Amino acid sequence: MLEFNPNEMTVPEVHRLLVGGVAPRPIALVSTVSKQGVDNLAPYSFFNTFGANPPMVAFSPSRRGSNGSLKDTYNNLVETGECVIQAVTYNIVSQVSVASAEYLPDVDEFVKSGLTKIESIIVKPKRVKESPFQMECILKQMIPLGDKNASGNLAVCEVVKFHVDENIIVNGTIEPNLIDLVSRMSANYYCRANGSAIFSLEQPNTKLGVGFDNLPDKVKNSKTFSGFELGRLASIQVIPTPTESRQYLEQYRLSENCDRDFSSLFQTYTENSNLEKMIELLISTNKNEIQTMIETVIKIAIEKNQIEVAWHLISLLK
């Protein structure tokens, strides 16, 4: 593994490592207004949420890398103490990119980007109509993190009003596929949080899994399973007993042997991720060399979030 000492690197080199390794990063589309009444709009990907009571968010309007000067967002926020932070969706990301350009302080990025400004309820900065998630904020603290080129400034803000499009909420939760967020990565790369890029993973909280240390050696030492899959197996609270696994698997045994068509059937069921049919084949064959196939079925069970079934199948491994 490569090692780097930031004190021996140029600022651009450090920046490239940070934005490539700390990613994907959510984007704060921040609107402010100057004392002269000029609206400003700019995106920041050094951004996250830091508490719910009170609701706190923070982003970094860093100094310019070229000369260390302060940006319009920083100046406006320090002068007025108010901003609106919007989510950036795939629909508006190209327009947001336009707003990121270094326009002069008297230029309105709403106009340049074509995004629509609407009045806020509490603060003076305008909201972006096209964003489905908007937060009116007041500045609680601006923390300087340095005074050199590209040094950060941590703007800690309290949310005083949320605005959320009702069409992105399902059962009280913002649905990822409906909000369709984008995030920043290295160089000119973005990431879209939609479709197959999204997966669910139950948070354990008080549900204590058996842990990696209780996985059988034949599973831990297998070169088939990824760390993700081993972690899913380790999340189960109680490992099924051999009797429970035997009883579960017996229900899939077919009345006649399927050795003759085993390979072709297994291939077909694998391509279709037909877990039940794959288990039927494994239980109903007399073939000895099926360990790799068993591991394949275990992987599919994990993929389908059927962790207990995966553990039953582990009992077939030698």
Image (spheres, rainbow, N blue to C red):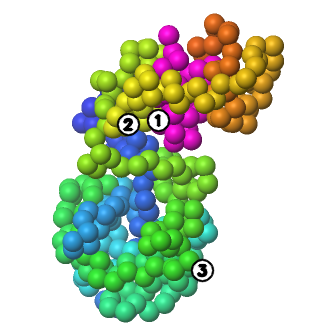
Residue 25 visible (yes or no): yes
Q: Amino acid at mark 2?
A: Ile
Q: Residue at x 48, y 20 (%)?
A: 315
Which disc number belongs to residue 308?
1
Mark 3 and mark 1 in contact? Answer it, CB < 8 Å.
no
Where residue 1 appears, as percent x and y from the top left, is 38, 22
Mark 3: secondary structure:
loop
Where residue 120 appears, as percent x and y from the top left, is 40, 90
Q: Residue at x 56, y 77 (%)?
A: 167
In this rendering, position of residue 184 left or right of residue 192? left
Q: Residue at x 77, y 29 (%)?
A: 268
Q: Which label's residue is closer to the chain start, 2 or 1?
A: 2
Mark 2 and mark 1 in contact? Answer it, CB < 8 Å.
yes
Q: CA distance from mark 3 to mark 2?
A: 51 Å
Where residue 238 appears, as percent x and y from the top left, is 34, 34
Based on the displayed image, in which of its 4 quarters is residue 70 positioned? bottom left
Q: Residue at x 18, y 64 (%)?
A: 143
Q: Which residue is mark 3?
A: 114
Identity of the residue furthest to the top in this view: 288
Q: CA distance from mark 3 to mark 1?
A: 52 Å
The stretch in magenta equals 293-318
Residue 42 visible (yes or no): no
Residue 118 colored magenta? no
Q: Which residue is mark 2?
A: 236
